Image: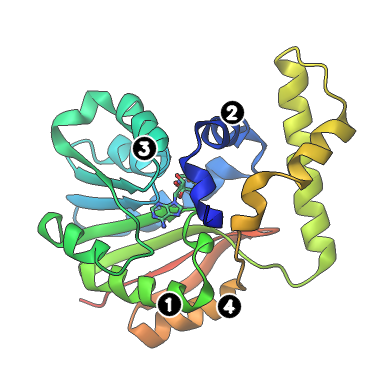
Amino acid sequence: MVNDEVWKLPAIVNRFLSYRAAIPLAQEQIGIMMSILKTNEEPIEKFLDLGCGDGILGAAILGTYPESRGVFADFSEPMLDEAREQLKEYAGQLVFENLDYGEPDWVSRMQPHGPFDAIVSGYSIHHQPDARKRPIYEEIYSLLKPGGWFINIEHIAAATQLTIDLFNNHIIDGRYAIEKANGGNKTRQEISDIFMNRPDKDANILLPVEVQCEWLREIGYESVDCYFRVYELAVFGGRRPN
Ligand SMILES: C[S@@+](CC[C@H](N)C(=O)[O-])C[C@H]1O[C@@H](n2cnc3c(N)ncnc32)[C@H](O)[C@@H]1O
């Protein structure tokens, strides 16, 4: 199994979803994504949530722009099932696509649905090799309307071991709190061992956010910045010029 394919396993999907509350400042990251999108004068009409998982980012867009039409793309059928379930009240205006954006032909699958006012992605593109990340950012650019935003909420490489340790400790504390709140009896050490040896860890290919922002500028995105960062997580992106 290729490393990132672990995301097709229901057990991995369930663990990620049940422990999401342990991600530091996850709601704030989505809030910043929405603050950026709201700077557009026109409402979002079409968006793409790439590597959507259960569709949490697209759900936030639908909450603010309930008339918008969204494409939710992921290569994990268990994740797409979660997204369909979570978003069933909007079913008539949504498309769910099982695709692997690691393969360049994903773009031709998306073109009939675009161009998009916003393409968002959460903790997903870091599963791609670095040599593939930059072409994906170019492909995303090609699918944006002029003025459209790409916002990546992403797991990125930290500059120090201390940052990594702080990040891991935050998540382990959060997972331990969830375990206790659910009446579980695992110790913090057991939770830590499970987290540090998790099967999806090998699927992470982390790169500094500065490198990725520079790529976006070179591709032609404007207003590129890392708008928020906590430990190994960053909200960064830019827009296609008008
Ligand atoms: C950590 S989850 C994040 C899910 C969601 N975006 C969120 O923010 O909660 C990563 C998601 O990316 C998807 N993914 C990873 N590699 C992919 C690929 N090459 N093509 C499509 N989806 C991919 C996984 O199936 C998984 O649903």
* Residue at the image point whose x is 28% and y is 58% from the top: 118
| 184 is higher (above) or lower (below) than 4 | above
Write down the residue under mark 2: 18
Q: Residue at x 78, y 29 (%)?
A: 176
Q: Earlier in the sequence, mark 1 or mark 2?
A: 2
Q: Mark 2: which secondary structure?
A: helix
Name the secondary structure under disc 4.
helix
Residue ranking furthest to the left: 112
Frontmost of labels 4 and 1 is 1
Instruction: Calculate the distance from the C-alpha at mark 3 to the C-alpha at mark 2.
Output: 18 Å
Q: Which residue is labeled 3 in the image?
A: 77
Q: CA distance from mark 3 to mark 4?
A: 33 Å
What's the distance in space between the residues labelled 1 and 3, CA to CA? 26 Å
Residue count near mark 4 (Cα–Cα under 10 Å), binned few <14, some 14–19, many ≥20: some
Q: Picture coordinates of residue 83 (x, y %)?
A: 35, 33
| Numbered label attached to residue 134 | 1
CB under 8 Å between discs 4 and 1: no
Q: In this image, 120 relative to 16: left or right?
A: left
Residue type at tag 1: Arg
**Residue named by callout 4:** 210
In front here: 227 or 41? 227
Q: Residues within 10 Å of mark 3 (few under 14, many from 20)?
A: some
Residue 71 position, x and y percent, is 24, 47
Pointer 3 or 4: first along the chain:
3
**Residue type indicated by callout 4:** Glu
State left or right for residue 126 relative to residue 88. right
The extreme top residue here reads: 183
Can residue 99 be seen in this snapshot?
Answer: yes
